Structures are given as C-alpha cells and as structure tokens.
Amino acid sequence: MSNVAVIGAQWGDEGKGKIIDWLANRAEVVVRFQGGNNAGHTIVVGDKTYKLSLLPSGVIQGKRSIIGNGVVVDPWSLLDEIGRVCAAGVAVTPDVLVLAENAVLVLPIHRELDAVREMSNTSKLGTTKRGIGPAYEDKVGRRAIRVVDLKDFDSLPAKVDRLLAHHNALRRGAGADEIDGDKLLAELKEVAPKILPYVGSSWRELDAARRAGKRVLFEGAQAVLLDIDHGTYPYVTSSNTVAGQAAAGAGIGPKQIGYVLGITKSYTTRVGEGPFPTEQVNATGEMLGSRGNEFGTVTGRKRRCGWFDSVLVRQTAITGGIDGIALTKLDVLDTFETIDVCVGYRLGDQVLDYLPADAVAQAKLTPVYETMEGWNCSTRGARSWADLPANAIKYVRRIEELIGAPVALLSTSPDRDDTIMVRDPFLG
C-alpha cells in the first residue's frame, strides 16, 4: 500500500474536501502540511455539511489527524472550528487531533498587518486578510512565536519583544499605534491551556505510523497555481503547495509521500486577483458559477469561472509531481451544447504550450480552444462508467491526453459516495 498526497492542480476550490474525505476512509492517518485558515474544504456527508479550514478532513471520520509544522495556525480560529465541528456531533479530542509543536502561530498583529497591506496596495493581491502571509514572513525571519513557546511563559516575553521590535517599527512607519506587548502576552496566556492538550510531535507520530505500516493521507491546501514558487506570482499564497511540501511540512522523507493525486475541476475557477486566460466574463461564466455554486468556503467570495485549461494542468502535473487526477464537478457541464478546452496560448506571433513566468506576458495571453460536443443529459450522481454518456467519457479521455496524466477518480456531485474510482491511489 502507498501513502497518498492530495494537492490542488488549478487555483484551488477544486473539490479537495470531498476527495480527501473519501480517501480518508481508506487511510489511518491524515496530515495537513501547509497553509492556514485562509483555505477551506467543504465536506458533504448525507444531510450534513462540514466546512473545515485548519482541521484535517480525517477528523470527520475520527481518524488520527495531524496539523503539521508547515501549517501556520491561528489558535483562536482553530478553537472556534473545533467548537463548530463538535457542535455538529463530531468529537475532536487529543486522541484524534495532534497539533505540531513546531508550527508557527498566526497572531492578531498578523491579521491587522495583512488587512492594512491589502487595503493600501495599489495592485490588490486578493488575500483573505487572515494574516497568513505576515505569519510566514515572521517564520522565515526567525522571529515567529511557535506553538511550543506557549509551554514556557518565563521565556515568552523575550520572544514577544523580539517579534514586536520588527512589527512596531513597521507600524511607526505607517503612522499606526504600536502593539501593546502586555496585552498580546495576556491573550496568549489565555489561549494556551485550551490548545496545549492537542500539542505533539508531527514527525514522531508519522515515524510511528510508518513503522506500523499505516496508510497516511497528506492533505494540501490551495493549489499548485497558487504556489509561492510555481504559481502565478505575485497573485499566489505564501507557502509551497506542491506535493514536495508534504515532506517538509509534515516531517517525513520525500520517499514516504508515495502516490500524488491532483484534484482538478472539469472547468476552471479562480478567487481573487491575477491572470486567468480562459475566464468567461459572460453568460457562460455565469452559468458555470451558478451550476457549480462557485462561492469561496472561507470568504464567500464569488469565484471567477472559465473553460478547462489543459495547458495549466499539464504544467501543474509536472511541477506538482502528479501521478493521477481526480476530476470533479463533471455534472456542472451537463447542459452545455458544446464545451471548449484550452489547448495552447497565443502570445503575439507565438503559440505557447506552457504558462510563461512573466506576469506581463501572462496578461497578454489569448487561449487557443478545441471545441467538443456536450452530452446534454445528467451525469449527477453517476457511480460507474456505465452511468456516463459517451460524450462525457470522450471529454474525460481527451483531458487525460492533453494533461498527460490519467484520471484515477471521477466526482459527479458533492456527495461522498458519488465517486467513480478508476484506480485506488493507495495501491500506487
């Protein structure tokens, strides 16, 4: 059996929550390895809908769930999420959840700085204003407060002073009031006993799981096109979202990742600013958004919608290390007479088969489309290939050819059980 890493292969919101929940039924340990509460997963089980941001999807099934060291953790948001999930009838106890002791904390000062920057930028980045970017900045700057620091309040004041020496200088430059260090310490002292029962060692947990031969599911947030290195910079998140980050963000060796599953919508969406070559700012885009219920799990923002872009997904399959894809929301395309698929870009006199790294060039791209016949009947709830119309199967097969990766799973509704398994990722 192989461990499995799940990553988004577009700009996020591809339906990772459902697929991860479906795979968690076959796993024994589920690990979140990057991002923060700026990401959201929606899981539908029967008549219940769960919206998760920090909690690994395994908690819904009571699986051992780890928030890895690569995640930046807002402790107040985490406690709120635990409370909401428990109120829905799911027990989230220290027997279920482990919070890596070396994970960095997102503090109120990070949220404030994030909001100030987003409001003042002449070119909006479209952040969620959750403080994720500033928290990662402090991590790399070696001044962050980590989960483990809450265990020792004798040494915490000096660490807070070091952090505030940087932040107060920024605030003075912006004409803002300085941060009250005593108030921040009091807030940390109040929240510490509530999260410390969950604190443990991610790498030791996973080493024990490896020795015991347990199947591990590594859960990514956002998607490859939002990767800080490989995404549409600067309109990206503040962490690495590719499968390679699962190793560093959880505390394992790269050979333990196993199979990489890329989650891919049957069309394309994006939240926030940045390039989007196949965006349809027209009736087609509105229909995709309406049928797909395209609103962000975390922010509620309306998603931009467009046709499937095989150029982008072929590229993310390479940079993300994707072995196979889970193709989601096929049913959203049920009513279209014809369906366009982007197979290249025009840039001046050139035709490109990749996304250039230059943001100026990205803004000038014109998609080259291949038009396919729609199937004009319902695929919603299909659970086998036999349930799919011929043109839907042709569409799926053509996507496989264009992106150079096979379809391992096919999702036909938000419900957990409406999934066609072509290949079990845990079998490698």
Image: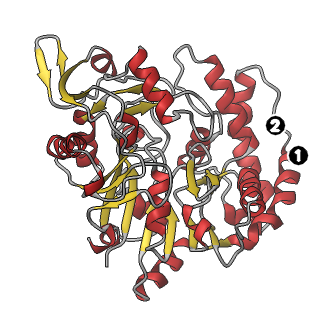
Q: Residue 343: horizontal and vertical position, in percent?
A: 17, 29
Q: Quadrant of the C terminus?
A: bottom left
Q: Which amino acid, mark 1?
A: Lys
Residue 271 higher or lower than 396, as above or below = above
Say whether residue 133 is visible: yes
Q: Residue at x 65, y 20 (%)?
A: 119
* Local SS, label 2: loop
Question: Mark 1: few, some, or many residues within 10 Å (few <14, many ≥20)?
Answer: few
Residue 8 higher or lower than 226, as above or below = below
Write down the quadrant of residue 94 in the picture.
Answer: bottom right
Q: Residue at x 61, y 34 (%)?
A: 128
Residue furthest top in the image = 348
Give the side of residue 302 with respect to residue 255, left or right: right
Q: Residue at x 45, y 41 (%)?
A: 12
Q: Which amino acid, mark 2?
A: Ile
Say whether residue 344 is visible: no
Q: Residue 100: horizontal and vertical position, in percent?
A: 60, 67
Residue denoted by label 2: 179
* Local SS, label 1: helix
Residue denoted by label 1: 183
Total marks in image:
2
Q: Residue at x 25, y 42 (%)?
A: 392
Question: Mark 2: few, some, or many residues within 10 Å (few <14, many ≥20)?
Answer: some
Q: Front-most of 393 and 157?
A: 393
Label for residue 87?
Answer: none
Q: Front-most of 401 and 166?
A: 401
Q: CA distance from mark 1 to mark 2?
A: 8 Å
Q: Residue 29: horizontal and vertical position, in percent?
A: 50, 74
Residue furthest bottom in the image = 212
Q: Residue 170: horizontal and vertical position, in percent?
A: 68, 29
